[in-house]
Amino acid sequence: KMSGETEKAMEKLQKSGHLVLVMFPFQGHITPMLQLAAILHSQGFSITIVHPEVNSPNPSNHPEFTFIPIPDKLTESEISDRDLANFALRVNNNCAAPFQECMKRIMHQKDSHDHISSILYDTFMYCAQTVADDLSLPGISVRTSVAASLLLYPVLPHLDRKDSFSANEVPEFQSLQLQQNRALLSQNSTDAVTEVRVAFTNGVKSSSAIIVNTMDFLEQAVLSKIKEYFPAPIFTVGPFHKLAQTICSSLRTEDANCISWLNKQAPKSVIYVSFGSLASIDEQELIETAWGLADSKQPFLWVVRPGLIRGSEWIESLPNGLQESVGERGYISKWVPQKEVLAHAAVGGFWSHCGWNSTIESICEGVPMLCKPFFGDQFLNSNYICQVWKIGLKLQDTFERGNIEAAIKRLMVDMEGEEMRKNAMDLKEKAELRLSQGGSSWSSLNEFTKQILL
Ligand code: UDP
């Protein structure tokens, strides 16, 4: 006989029904979406993941989800196009019709016990909101980045003028330099950028709920401001990676040997360096980085993913003398298990491009950061890190070996770095509280589940 608990769980499972999650095909978006899928699955929902064919996740790593690839019709050259707005525009334009077809098929197949409750889509897959509206299903926007990035769009020109506000209204906004960020983004505005921004914002405005991979205490003032601009309730359920710890989402093979190398290093001595899955540098910047790391005399673990260096396969342009100067003190890898690296006792600092996943992973392990943002919301994240949370410092100016050496020493050796490490540990503790039973991320998740079940 089933226990009362099991009976309740079964009942819940039947009532919860079925969620469709729609992915945007970049590593930094796929990972949080899979994590969210796991979180919702553990709440009793059955999960179908619809994704463009490019950068497909490996379904055999996630037997509990149903994966449906949809044709994106992208050519090789379109896939390697470094213009992200063009890429987002093409993916949405090409996937809208196949996604609609796919939804009709799913709805047709399923019996009434397994009705589709909602479509949850990455904010950059805004075509899914249009399909949801068309099928009279609730569309839920999932922002995989910092919540503040939702505000950059309403303050941009070309949108409804009623929407603009002064960034000086809230002190936190001054530190975030939203105005400068806006200027920075506007400088590079192409028609594609404008179109994506408008569609992105309209998607969020029409959605029934917004989920953000953040924690309330990280962005309190910003979250209240967002509520003025978007009518849907906002749920801060982050950090997803801590609520769904076992998800394996790397599109590349992870190098486990780096952990054996870390095991041999002194506590908090290693600077970990990674610029994520999209940013790129040129050969000269590679060489300056290498000498900066060598001259700092700190042990370093450096991710050079194939594709990081424009015009090179990998690290063939590094000078021979470098190896002699560094010896066993440096480890270069193509891709590492980053969360494990950040949690390792030997890691004392993270030189990052400030992608949101990297930022929140670093916060959760109490690791202070050296910031070198490349594009988009990485500038916002870097301002949060250095100006608002004070858990890191900016690498000023260009990639130059003297600059790099000095910045690494400030972070890893000087008193200044000690202060940032203390602040980072405070944030880690706060994050742990949010994540414990009854903490804000849990209650936000429960409220969200209730809303879907209504
Ligand atoms: N990552 C990893 N191994 C690496 C480098 C990065 O697993 O060697 C992961 C990292 O943990 C993060 C993601 O790749 O989850 C990068 O996402 P982020 O938002 O930081 O940057 P993006 O790649 O989107 O620019």
Image (cartoon, rainbow, N blue to C red):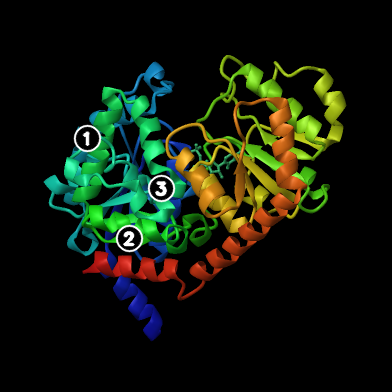
Q: First in sequence: mark 1 or mark 3?
A: 1
Where is residue 403? Give x, y as percent: 69, 31
The response on whether ligand 1 sits within 8 Å of label 3 is yes
Helix, strand or loop at mark 1: helix
Kindly identify which numbered label has been placed on residue 224: 2
Q: Disc 1 vs disc 3: Cβ atoms closer than 8 Å?
A: no
Is 368 left, or right, of 10 in this rendering? right
Circle 3 crowding by C-alpha within 10 Å: few under 14, some 14–19, many from 20? many
Mark carried by residue 144: 3
Q: Quadrant of ligand 1?
A: top right
The residue singled out by tag 1 in the image is 96
Local crowd at mark 2 within 10 Å, few (<14), some, or many (≥20)?
Answer: few
Q: Nearer the viewer, residue 453 or 201?
A: 201
Q: Are marks 1 and 2 in contact (CB under 8 Å)?
A: no
Q: Is residue 103 visible?
A: no
Q: Provide residue 339's location: percent of width, then percent of height.
A: 61, 50
| Three-letter code, disc 2 | Ser
CB at mark 2 closer than 8 A to ligand 1?
no
Q: Residue, x 34% and y 23% (percent of image)?
A: 74
In this figure, what is the number of numbered marks? Answer: 3
